[in-house]
Structure formats: C-alpha cells, structure tokens
Image (cartoon, rainbow, N blue to C red):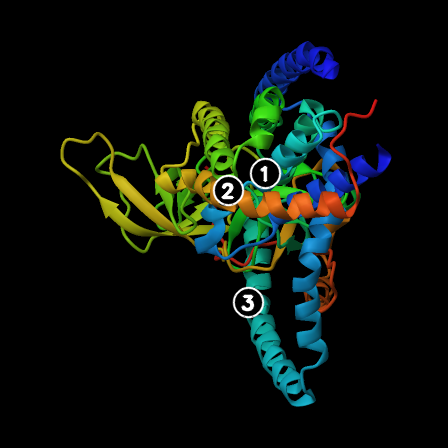
C-alpha cells in the first residue's frame, strides 16, 4: 500500500513538472493534460488507492502553479476521475482505442468546465486551438498507458484491492 | 467484488463534497481573494518543483558565463563601461532638472515626490496558463514582496504582482486580458486606461471619444491614479488610431515599451509605502548634492539583489500637479 502510493505520487509529481515545463510558443497549446492522464491511469489500475480526493489535491496544485482560480482545474479533475472510478472495470478490458475515445470525451468535458469558468470571469480564450489539448492528450493516451503499466509491473504493484 | 458495493456510494459522496468544495473555493477566491494564505502555502510546496525545472536553463546561462573567453568578457566589460559613462552623464542632467523641479514644487507647496526602492527579481522559466499573461518571479514574501506591487524593466512598466508565495510570486503583465493600467498621454496630458488584450504586443485604449487629441507615436506614461503603479513611468507607444464612423469611441492600439516576452530579469518597485518613506531622503535633496550623485553612481549592475533609492524614473520628467 505504501509503495503503491509512493510510486503513484512520484508519477503524479512528474506529470506536474511536465505540465509547467517551458515549451516553445507554438507548442504551448498542444501540451497534453499530463496530470489528468496519469491520474486516469492510476484510477483505472488502483481505484482503491487513487481516487477523487487525490485528483482534487492534484487539481489544486495545478491551479496554484497556473495561477488560475483555486478549484478551476480541480473540479474537472474530480469529475473525470469519478467517472473513471465508476467505469474502471469496463475500461480495463477495453482496447486502447476504445479507452482513448472515452478519455477524449472526458477531457473534452473537463476543458469545457474550465472554459466555462474562464468565460464567467470574462477571460475566455478566443481560439479553437484551446481544444488542441484534448486531442493531443487523447493521442498520447496509449503511450502513457503502456509506460505507466510497465512501471507498475516493474514495481510489482498488484491490481488487487488491499484494505 | 464486494469492495465495489462499499466503494460505490463512498466515491459518489466524496465527489459531490469535492465538487461543492471546488465551487465554494472558486467563489471565495474570485469574490473576496481571501485564499492568499492557502495559495501561498501551496506555492511554497511547489517552489522546489519550479526551481528544478528552471535549473537546466539556469545552468546553461551559468555555463555560458563561466566558459566564455576572457576576450569576450573584456569586450563586454568595455561596452558596459562606455554605456555606464553615457548614462551617468545623462543622470547628471536629470539630477539638476530634478532639483529644479523639487524647488518649484516646494514653491507651489505641492506634495513632495516619494522615494522608491528597487529589487531585481529573476523570472523562473516555467509555463503558466497559456491564455493568460502571467510570469513567475523568484522573490516572495521573504523579500517583502506584496500583492499589487508594480514590476518594471529598463524600458517601462511590465505589470503587477498578484500572488505572493514564501519564495516566489506570480505577476500579471499589463497585456493580460483582465488587466488595465491608468495612463496619460505624455504630449497632451490626456488621461485614459490602457487595457490588456491578451496579445503580448498590444494594449487598447477604450472609451476615448473621436475628437480625443491623440496620434500615432504618442508616448503613454503611467499616471499613478489608483495608487498601484508609480507615476511617470513609460508604458506604451501609440501604434494605431482609427476613428470608425458609427462607433461611439475611437479604436486606439498601443505597443508596450517593456520587453514583456524577452526580459529575464525584472525590477520590483516599492513606492508610496508608509515605512518606505524615510525623512532623510528628502533632506538629502535639500542640502548636499554630491551625496545624491554618488548614490546613483554606486548603482553597479553586477550586485545581484540591488536595493537602491531611486528618486526619479528614467523618463522625461513632467510637472503634473493637476
């Protein structure tokens, strides 16, 4: 249990670093939503240890580092992880393509929530490239999945529920 | 299998609570801005992460400096010395003008100008929200940075601090879509607000009538109204003036003078704060002139956190007691 949490936390911190890594100007809008992708994987693989609470705290960390409203990223993340938790058994046996399709819609909803909050504050971005993030995240899902799965197997973290 | 039935409602309850908590947090953060303590604590936790991301870039600059040849260093040094001399000559003239200005002010019994203190902060190279113009600085509440503090660079006003952490702070640039800065036109004294557009090289002057006396090339300087920004710092230059028929207001665009996307170092300005207004600084100007001159001469660029008393910005001074 302890090792599980430690490995998961390390990957989430890694994702957080990727999320604030400086990119060239043309690539900024294509930056995948690393933190959500990693959280989705862990919620699918270990729903007993990584849940909505972890997602909420990760979202708050992202909010502070992005300088957005406290809770703006957190709310979308909680909703996405909640849906993943409900459906994790179906998603596990789905193919990578099917998983990617589900994740596309979840991330799209998450971005819509963030856009909605930005819109209420009067600073909604006027660019369709805003939704590029969802597309690149979806395209990178199979890769993220395979890497994290190998990592999980390497550290011998089992899928079984441990209480 | 049974764990599923235990977990089901629990996750739902937790999700509901957290969603409500997020909505409450967002409302509180937006309406009352009373979450600064939480934000500051979290940003203290995040600072090591941000620092470690910035580290390779910092190392690159460090290596660039360390392994540069003596010849290039000498060349640079010579160039800086020449520029330093030039600047000092200009400063002498400014000193005299300022003294005169001060005397005239006293004759009019207008309020004396306040002194300002500067501190160099480095921009930490991490990406923040791509749709907002924010930067992260490596000075925080441990260096007395406060919320609303103006930041400038050598060319003009850059923005203001919006969140302060223990070791770092977040600043918003004047071009952010949610930012506005009170300015006036240097040539005519016409007051206006320069709104950010979300584009790094454009400010908009809204709500100016068609007959406003303004033309391309006019310099906008900060008016100091509102108290956040110090007065008389350059802000932008007018690049476009259109007076479209059928619109109530003229469409005026300006280009910020500060190097908003190129600077690596910025200056934090303390101005008008009660504890930053020592009496002797005004006395300084009264009697001994040499002291003031050496003061500005000491201002060497290689001392990294330079704190210096700066009585006047490097702008053409104008008398604006309206």
Horizontal side of B183 relative to B56 (left or right) equals: left
Q: Is residue B309 above or below residue B183?
A: below
Q: CA distance from mark 1 to mark 3?
A: 61 Å
As drawn, the residue found furthest toward the right would be A2
Q: In the image, which is nearer the foreground, mark 1 or mark 3?
A: 1
Q: In the image, which is nearer the foreground, mark 2 or mark 3?
A: 2
Q: Residues within 10 Å of mark 1 (few under 14, many from 20)?
A: many
Which residue is at 45% across, 29% downward? A105
Which residue is at 85% across, 34% downward? A2
Task: Return the residue at label 1.
Answer: A37
Task: Return the residue at label 3.
Answer: B93
Q: Decide which of B243, B64 is in the foreground and name it.
A: B64
Residue B178 placement (x, y as % from top left):
46, 34
Q: Are marks 2 and 3 on the same chain?
A: no
Which residue is at 63% across, 20% downward? B25
Label 3 chain ID: B
Q: Residues within 10 Å of mark 2 (few under 14, many from 20)?
A: many
Residue A37 placement (x, y as % from top left):
59, 38
Q: Decide which of B301, A46 is in the foreground and name it.
A: A46
* Numbered mark located on residue A137 in the image: 2
Q: Secondary structure at mark 3?
A: helix
Which residue is at 76% across, 33% downward? B41
**Cβ–Cβ under 8 Å for marks 1 and 2:** yes
* The quarter of the displayed image where residue B153 is located: bottom right
Q: Is residue B304 above or below residue B29?
A: below
Q: Secondary structure at mark 2?
A: helix
Horizontal side of B287 relative to A74 (left or right) equals: right
Residue A80 placement (x, y as % from top left):
56, 26
Q: Earlier in the sequence, mark 1 or mark 2?
A: 1
Q: Is residue B311 visible in the rendered structure shown here?
A: no
């Amino acid at each position: 249990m302890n090792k599980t949490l430690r490995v998961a936390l390390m990957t989430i911190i890694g994702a957080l670093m990727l999320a604030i890594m400086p990119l060239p100007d043309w690539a900024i809008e294509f930056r995948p939503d690393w933190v959500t992708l990693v959280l989705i994987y862990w919620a699918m693989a270990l729903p007993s240890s990584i849940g909505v609470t972890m997602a909420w705290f990760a979202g708050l960390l992202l909010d502070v580092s992005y300088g957005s409203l406290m809770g703006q990223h957190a709310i979308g993340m909680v909703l996405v992880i909640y849906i993943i938790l409900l459906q994790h058994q179906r998603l596990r046996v789905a193919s990578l393509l099917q998983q990617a399709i589900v994740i596309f819609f979840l991330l799209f909803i998450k971005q819509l929530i963030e856009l909605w909050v930005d819109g209420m504050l009067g600073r909604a971005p006027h660019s369709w490239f805003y939704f590029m993030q969802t597309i690149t995240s979806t395209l990178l899902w199979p890769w993220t999945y395979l890497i994290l799965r190998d990592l999980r197997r390497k550290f011998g973290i089992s899928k079984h529920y441990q209480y | 299998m049974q764990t599923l039935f235990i977990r089901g409602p629990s996750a739902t309850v937790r999700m509901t609570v957290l969603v409500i908590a997020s909505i409450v947090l967002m409302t509180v953060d937006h309406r009352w801005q009373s979450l600064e303590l939480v934000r500051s604590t979290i940003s203290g936790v995040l600072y090591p992460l941000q620092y470690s991301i910035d580290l390779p870039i910092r190392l690159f600059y460090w290596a660039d400096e360390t392994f540069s040849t003596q010849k290039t260093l000498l060349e640079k040094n010579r160039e800086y010395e020449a520029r330093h001399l030039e600047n000092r000559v200009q400063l002498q003239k400014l000193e005299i003008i300022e003294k005169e200005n001060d005397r005239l002010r006293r004759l009019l019994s207008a309020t004396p100008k306040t002194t300002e203190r500067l501190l160099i902060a480095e921009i930490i190279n991490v990406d923040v929200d791509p749709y907002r113009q924010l930067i992260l600085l490596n000075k925080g509440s441990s260096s007395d940075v406060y919320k609303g503090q103006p930041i400038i660079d050598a060319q003009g006003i850059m923005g203001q601090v919006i969140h302060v952490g223990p070791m770092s702070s977040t600043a918003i640039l004047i071009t952010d879509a949610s930012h506005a800065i009170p300015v006036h036109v240097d040539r005519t004294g016409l007051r206006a607000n320069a709104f950010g557009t979300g584009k790094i090289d454009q400010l908009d002057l809204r709500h100016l009538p068609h007959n406003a006396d303004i033309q391309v090339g006019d310099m906008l300087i900060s008016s100091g109204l509102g108290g956040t920004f110090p007065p008389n710092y350059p802000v932008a230059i007018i690049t476009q003036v259109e007076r479209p028929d059928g619109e109530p207001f003229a469409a005026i665009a300006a280009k910020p003078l500060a190097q908003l996307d190129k600077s690596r170092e910025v200056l934090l300005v303390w101005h008008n704060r009660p504890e930053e207004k020592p009496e002797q600084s005004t006395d300084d100007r009264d009697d001994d002139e040499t002291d003031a001159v050496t003061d500005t001469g000491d201002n060497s660029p290689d001392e990294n956190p330079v704190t210096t008393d700066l009585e006047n910005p490097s702008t053409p001074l104008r008398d604006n007691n309206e």
